[in-house]
Structure formats: C-alpha cells, structure tokens
Image (cartoon, rainbow, N blue to C red):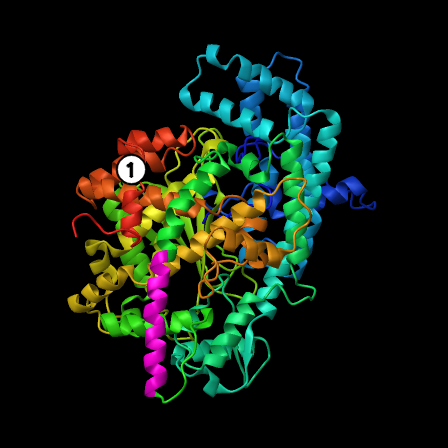
Amino acid sequence: MPRLRLLVIATSIGLAACSQAPNNTASAPAPSASAPASASTTAASAQESNPFFTASTLPYQAPPFDKIKDGDYQPALDEGMKEQLAEVDKIANNPEPPTFENTYVALEKSGVLLDRVMRVFNAITAANTDDALQKVQEEEAPKLAEHQDAITLNDKLFQRIQAVYDQKDSLKLDPESQRLIEVVHRNFVMGGAKLSADDKAKLKDLNKEESTLEAQYNNKLLAAAKDGALVIDDKSKLAGLSDEDIAAAAQAAKDRKLDGKWVLTLQNTTQQPLLQDLTDRDTRKALFEASWTRAEKGDANDTRDIIERLAQLRAQKAKLLGLPNYAAWTLQDQMAQTPETVMSFMGKLAPAAVARAKVEAADIQKQIDKDQAALHQPTFKLEPWDWEHYAEEVRKARYDLDDSQIKPYFELDDVLQNGVFYAANQLYGLTFKERKDIPVYQPDVRVFEVFDKDGKSIALFYCDYFKRDNKNGGAWEDVFVGQSKLLGTKPVIYNVTNFTKPQAGQPALLSLDDVITMFHEFGHGLHSLFADEQYPTLSGTNTARDFVEFPSQFNEHWATDPKVFANYAKNYKTGEPMPQALVDKMKKAGLFNKGYDMTELVAAAMLDMNWHMLGADAPKQDADAFEAASLKKDGVDLSYVPPRYRSSYFLHIWSNGYSAGYYAYLWTQMLADDAFEGFKQHGGLTRENGDRFRDMILSRGNTVELSKLYKDWRGQDPSIEPMLIDRGLKQSPSK
C-alpha cells in the first residue's frame, strides 16, 4: 500500500514542496563575534545547520540522510507550519479579486518546508524509528491537526475558493486545472469549511483528539508487536523450521540480549508465516496467541481503549459534518461513494469465500485425522493455529509442492532486477542503475536511478526490504519528493517490506507471496514514477483509496507471467531455471487456499466498515464484543479463519488513513483482474500495451474522475467476473 501520512501532504490545501521557492527564513545576519548571539540570530544559526531548511543539493533533491539528525525534525516541522500559515494568510487576505492563479495555484505552491520535512519524517517514523522520534510524533500530531484545520477552516480563504469555484465554468481553464478546482473545493467542504463558527471549533477539538490518539495508537502497536514476540527456551520447540529461520530467531534473541534463546518476531497480520512449518502444536498455539493478543494484554501497550474512543470521535465528526456515520463521510470522494455500495460489493464475495473456506477446512480436518491416526494419537478439531501447517500438508499431498522447493529460485536480488525491473523494461522501456553514492537512512537500504525508454534519467527508487524491530509491519510505498510540473520536482520513490534478513553471507530467499509483494509495491512506485501532472494535489498516487491499489495489484500479475517468470526464477546456486514440472505444480496450486485468503480479507474489510458505520448516538463499544458481533452478523465468523487483522492491531484503519477504506484492496482486485483480462485480450506483455496503460492510467494521477479514467482506457466498466475466477470463487467458463 502507499504510505498514508500522519498529515496528508500535497492535498488540496496545498502542502506541497517547491524546490525553487526562496527560503525566506534563513536570511538573518550572523551574530557578532564580540557580542552574545540574540535569540533571533541563534534561531537563524540553528536553521542554517538544519538540512531541512534548504532544498537538498542531491540528485532529485533526495534527502541528505548523512546530515539529518533526530533533533532536526521538530524545529523544521514547527517552522514549516509557521511559514505555511503566513503564506495562507497572505492568500486569504489578498486585496485582489480571487482568481484561479492567486488562490488555487498559490495554495499549490505553499508549504515548501513543511512538505520537505514531513515526507522524510513520516518515512523514518514508519521504517526506522526510535524513542526520540516517537516522542516528536506524539507531540507534533495535535499541532499538525490544528495546522490543517487552520487552513481548511479559514473562512476568508474558503470564500475565495468558493468564489472561483462558482465561476469555474466560465474560466476556460484546461481540464487539469478544472479538476483541481473541483477536488480542492470538495476537500474543503468535506473538511468542514461550510460549518458555523461554533461547529468549526467543535471540529477542531475532535480533530486534535483524533490525531493525538492515532499517534499514540501507532506507537503502542509498534511496542506491542515487539514485546509480543514469542520467546523460545527449548530449540526442540522449533522443530520443522528451516536452518535459516532458526538462525534468524537466534539472531533476533541476540539482538534483544537473550543469548541462548530464540525469538519469533511478529508480522503485522493475524496469521504468522512460521505457523506453516512449526510441527509442535503447542508452539504454534503460543505463536498464534502471541499474535492475536499482542495489543490486548491489559498493559501500557493495550490499544482497545484508544480504538473504542477513535470510533466515537469519528462518528461525532461525521454527524457534525452532516453525515449519518464516518463511512458515509469518508466515501464521498471514493469510487464506491456510499457504504451501501461497499457492503453490497462485499456481500457478493463473502458467501462464495466462506463456502470455499468450509470445503478447504474439511480437507484439512481429514489431513489432521489421517496424521493423528498414523501417530496412534487422538485427533483434534481444526483451530486457526493449525490451518497454515496442515493446509501446507494438503498442498504437498495434492500438488507435491512445498516452499522449500520454490524458495531457491526466488533470490531477492534476482527477483528485483530480473523480475520487477525486467517487467518494467518490457512494458515501459525502463532501465535501472544502482547508486552507491546517495546517502540512506539505514545500511540495508538500496538506491537505484531510473531511466526512461529514451535513456533520460527520470527518478530515484529506494528499497528497504528487511524487517527490523523499529519498523512498522507490512509493506508500503511512498515518495520523499513528489512530481509536479508547477514546482519543477520529479519523483524520489521508496518501497518498504518486512522480509526476513538472512545471516551474513547467506542469500535472501523469498516465498512466492514475498515475490508478489515486491511486484505489488513496485506497482505503486510506477504510479508515482510516471506521474505527469501540473499540480501536486493531483499527482501520482494522490487518488481515491479504492483506486490507488489498482496499479499495484495489477502489477502483481507480471510476477507469474511466463516470460517474466522465466527471466528471474532461477536457482541461486546453479543459475538453472525452475524446472517446467515445478512451474506446472505451482500453477496448479495457485488457487489453493483461496477460500481462506479471501475470507480473512473480507472479514477484516467488513469489520472496518462496521466500526465506521456506527452513528454518533451509539455508546462506546467493547472492542472484543463488537468484533465478535460484527463477524457473526456478516456471516464471516468461522472459528478457524480469523480476520486478517483484529480490531486492536488493525493499523490500516486506526492510524494509516484506511478507515472505512480497507475494502479498497478488494475493490481494486476487481479493477486489477479486469484490467489484466484486457491486457490478455490485446497480447499481454507488450510495449504497446504498456505505453497505453502508462499514458491513460499511470501518468494521469487524479486529473480525471476515476471511473471515467478507467472506462476510457478499458472501453467498459469494470466487471467482477475476472476477479471471481482469478481468486478461485467461480469456475472459468472455459473449464
């Protein structure tokens, strides 16, 4: 997913970088050598030494990580807010009549410093944080919420925005400028610009409390995941794990000064990858429960009280803004538009997913019974901590396939350069060159310069693939510098994942899911990389949530395209391609376990919607009771298929901007599968198809209403049929 920020940058309120703008805060004279420095000259000196106060001189204005210190962020954030408010005040009080240029374009140019520091700050607090940065994060969150409100709820400013909006049809602007007017005006209205003064004050209080709680939630959850890791004292309890996994667990223990022990760290999802291989059922249960209860231990990291309050705050905010619930408010600018549309869409998926999961469960129970009989042991009922382990046994028995056969063909660098980059070359003509001279924020991070089909340098791409205790779980994409013709900036992109880091000298071998994650996040990267917009508000991934996952999920398809696959799926020791028999097995197994996969995803998405369809008059909920009732109501309460995220550790919806939006992953699966069907109908992996997709989708950002953008490219509205077939929920008509 693209990383959604603590404060959304480059939104309609103009928090955008401007590399050419003068830095009017660093021009104070130096203090006299014979007299003590005044407060103003001391501040100026501090600004001169702070790398955020001037545009970076590195290629593409890449962040100078070799110069940035923890102490640089807070002064730059505070000064950035101060500067932008001065700029906004100037726009709002301009004595000239409001025009598109002196209002909308002026807003797009505001917030130079704030944008520069926020992009880096959000990246580092997500991927390489520490106690000092977490403290800054919690201190700045309410200030940033107040700052955003000071712009969105500025009555004089909105009067100018409204005045231009009212005459937009007579201004004879180009289509992108017309779109900017529509998007900015709508976002101001959604942000409360039309409220009364009293209601604006109430909204500010709600926003301040919400942002504070979101920051606290984020930091509590990171600590909960770290503290919730399972500590193993007896190596025999790790039976079934590979030597590499055991070594990684030993290293994780050593990093925590727990020599002689092993630590199984938690990933952000409910299910943990190691459950597949662990043969000791007690260890599996302990690992699952460590994951399931990570944020529900009744300690300082318990998140339930926060999320229960956040649900209340959001419902109250929606009521203040004239909507029945938060989902109705936040969906206004999405493709789906209403909660009813979303729930209807998921209602088409849930019964088929659950039915398939029940069939899969019956097969797994048979495997458990068979195994226990062979051991002359009583059988047991399938539980969630058994699913991954015995599903893998069923897969092995049915397809004679397991991860140990596949992983030697998926070495990380081969996947990156001969898979991800190769597909981008075949489709779009891109080439990549690693840069060792550009500073990074952590030694594992790599940087590549990106060249277009004509050989012209167009972007920088950073990748940070290995898990760390100070990194949020999951995977995401974002930019250090966004694209804008108005501002003269080009993209500096990064991808972050949480793959297990190998021991020194050992290869990083990936699962097929890991491979698909790399293609997914790079799909977001392509959306940012090909951005070709005038205005930062409309650029790249600044689209609706239920569109932004479309390019990334579409790019996943190339991971298993025969031509791309053959180029990277080679044994890391011998260089030999994956044998065709193994490829065929993998393809046959491709739809295995899809009922489980879809059910856990639909359950999480429906849980999100139910939290955010609460009305303002609803009492404060008990998180666990609400979750259980929600899953039962929607018919997705299978005891052996827990939701992909439990409410208490559902980072997407409580702190990452996907509230009432997790359905977007399913909605965009529909778009992606329908789009890939369109590619297949026109020859698949060709430069012609790639260039057309680039020109009509990837380069357009939010410059066109998104349903129209898709239909103009595809020639039809998206169909759910390819998704149902591709995800194993419906038989293909050809079979």
Position in image of residue 332 (x %, y %): 51, 32
Q: Nearer the viewer, residue 114 or 457?
A: 114
In the image, is residue 161 part of the stretch drawn in magenta? no
Position in image of residue 530 (x %, y %): 36, 39
Residue at the top extreme of this rendering: 170
Label 1: few (<14), some (14–19) or many (≥20) C-alpha neighbours in 10 Å: some
Label 1: which secondary element: helix
Residue at the right extreme of this rendering: 35
- Residue 463 visible within the image: no
In the image, is residue 367 part of the stretch drawn in magenta? yes
Secondary structure predominantly adopted by residues drawn in magenta: helix
Q: Nearer the viewer, residue 385 or 697?
A: 385
Q: Quadrant of residue 242?
A: bottom left
Q: Nearer the viewer, residue 527 or 197?
A: 197
Magenta residues, start to end: 355-374
What's the residue at 28%, 56% (across, down)? 419
What's the residue at 26%, 48% (across, down)? 425
Q: Quadrant of residue 572?
A: bottom left
Position in image of residue 628 (x %, y %): 55, 57
What's the residue at 70%, 42% (across, down)? 208
Position in image of residue 453 (x %, y %): 27, 41
- Placement of 394 over or under 514, stated as above or below: below
Q: Is residue 347 left or right of residue 454?
A: right
Q: Nearer the viewer, residue 704 or 321?
A: 321
Q: Is residue 118 left or right of residue 557?
A: right
In this figure, which residue is indicated by the disc labeled 1?
Answer: 693
Q: Is residue 45 left or right of residue 700?
A: right
- Residue 298 visible within the image: yes
Q: Quadrant of residue 687?
A: top left
- Name which residue type carries label 1: Phe
- Placement of 2 over or under 702, stated as above or below: below
